[in-house]
């Protein structure tokens, strides 16, 4: 059996995220070393853009040196992000000691007794039936490495709006006689058998942006292949979590301090946290002050904190007797756990009620 580590979508970028990205990369390299993997497969979007690729590739290649010395091949294909803003053909780059398989439509790399069919990202893979892929060798496992969407394994919308990924047919895995497909692009992990192959998205290796699809632990796949293929995942410790909360403001623009402290207590210094402040306020400036104070509080506990306000301004709402009665009753029902489904429903009911009251107040003028 041969062991490989499969990671994807690290999106290394320059600027304030660089140190964080590098800590995750270091963890992946340390894992490949401790697991004595024969190959580390990076299934695209190692860099966030062509500019990041250009600026940081030398530093990143240096980081891979100890792994190469230990006998682990590093195989990397470009994703859609490496092409963002590209001013040069990626095949022109030598990323020694990394095997940078940028040639389209595919290239074959043999390493650790495994045959890797490396397919760089493309807007379409429609021509795959005409690819001249050699017959699979007896006793040599075959791994497809690609950065693409597959509509069987992932039925949701593309996670990206500006750079859509090409869609790969299930039949491609069968036709190429793959034992395992090391995919990238979908930031939430997925695993499914397609066309006889075990097809995996490990998910993004770090929290790439403030979006619910970045939630959950960040992982890499540890694949053992030979007669059979088995996959387990390893959670990355340095990636942290993406955490998103919605909190209501009261009419004077204040937030419940106990709810804030509960969120702060659950954060680690590696997390990216986003809080959306909702509700109806009488003065938007008060909401802004609350948002700034909240951001400062959360920044002291998390790697990054974002606070957004989705409030509606309705002056004179609190002097309305109906509003007072509504708030007095509904706030008695506030569930304790801000992450529960009950809380979400309660928050919506409170918001709709206040919106309705605000609308009637305007009509009544
Ligand atoms: Mn991608």
Image (cartoon, rainbow, N blue to C red):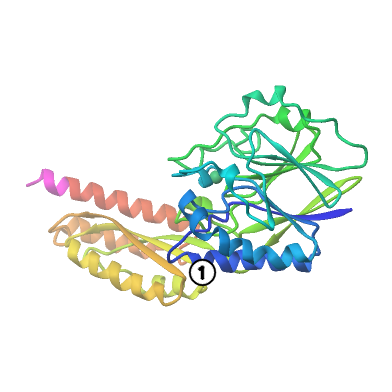
Horizontal side of 237 relative to 279 (left or right) equals right
Identify the residue at horizontal 49%, vertical 62% (top origin).
243
SS for tag 1?
helix
The residue nearer to you, when weighing 311 against 6, is: 6
What are the residue bounds of the magenta stretch?
360-365
Residue 252, position as x, y percentages in the image = 21, 66
The residue nearer to you, when weighing 239 against 43, is: 43
The residue nearer to you, when weighing 83 against 315, is: 83
Quarter residue 129 falls in: top right
Q: Is residue 364 magenta?
A: yes
Residue 15, position as x, y percentages in the image = 43, 64
- List the residue tagged with mark 1: 19
Residue 59, position as x, y percentages in the image = 57, 64
Magenta stretch, main secondary structure, is: helix
Quarter residue 23 falls in: bottom right
Horizontal side of 62 relative to 115 (left or right) equals left
Give the class, few, some or many, for how many residues have Cα within 10 Å of label 1's Cα (few <14, many ≥20): few
Q: Quadrant of ligand 1?
A: top right
Residue 236 seen: no
Identify the residue at horizontal 62%, vertical 40% (top origin).
120
In the depicted structure, whether residue 88 falls above or below residue 246: above
Residue 104 seen: yes
In the depicted structure, whether residue 112 falls above or below residue 35: above
Q: Is residue 218 magenta?
A: no
Identify the residue at horizontal 21%, vertical 50% (top origin).
357
In the depicted structure, whether residue 306 falls above or below residue 348: below
């Amino acid at each position: 059996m041969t062991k490989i580590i499969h990671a994807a979508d690290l999106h290394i970028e320059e600027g304030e995220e660089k140190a964080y990205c590098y800590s995750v990369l270091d963890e992946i390299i340390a894992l490949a070393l401790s697991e004595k993997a024969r190959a580390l497969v990076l299934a695209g979007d190692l860099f966030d853009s062509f500019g990041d690729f250009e600026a940081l590739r030398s530093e990143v290649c240096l980081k891979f040196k100890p792994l190469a010395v230990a006998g682990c091949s590093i195989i990397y294909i470009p994703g859609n992000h490496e092409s963002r803003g590209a001013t040069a053909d990626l095949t022109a780059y030598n990323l020694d000691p990394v095997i940078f398989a940028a040639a389209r439509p595919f290239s074959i790399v043999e390493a650790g007794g495994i045959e890797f069919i490396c397919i760089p990202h493309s807007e379409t893979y429609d021509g795959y039936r005409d690819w001249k892929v050699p017959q699979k060798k007896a006793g040599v496992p075959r791994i497809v490495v690609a950065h693409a969407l597959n509509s069987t394994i992932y039925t949701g919308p593309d996670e990206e709006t500006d750079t859509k990924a090409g869609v790969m047919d299930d039949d491609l895995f069968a036709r190429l006689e793959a034992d395992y497909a090391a995919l990238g692009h979908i930031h939430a992990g997925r695993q499914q058998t397609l066309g006889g192959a075990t097809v995996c998205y490990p998910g993004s290796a770090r929290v790439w942006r403030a979006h619910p699809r970045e939630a959950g632990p960040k992982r890499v796949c540890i694949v053992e292949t030979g007669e059979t293929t088995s996959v387990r995942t390893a959670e990355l410790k340095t990636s942290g979590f993406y955490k998103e909360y919605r909190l209501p403001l009261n009419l004077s623009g204040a937030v419940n301090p106990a709810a804030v402290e509960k969120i702060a207590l659950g954060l680690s210094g590696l997390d990216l946290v986003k809080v959306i402040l909702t509700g109806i306020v009488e003065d938007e400036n008060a909401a802004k002050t609350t948002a700034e104070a909240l951001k400062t509080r959360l920044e002291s506990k998390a790697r990054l904190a974002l606070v957004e306000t989705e409030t509606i301004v309705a002056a004179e709402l609190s002097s309305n007797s109906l509003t007072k009665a509504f708030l007095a009753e509904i706030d008695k029902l506030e569930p304790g756990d801000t992450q529960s489904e009950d809380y979400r429903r309660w928050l919506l009911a409170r918001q709709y009620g206040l919106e309705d009251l605000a609308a009637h107040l305007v009509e009544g003028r």
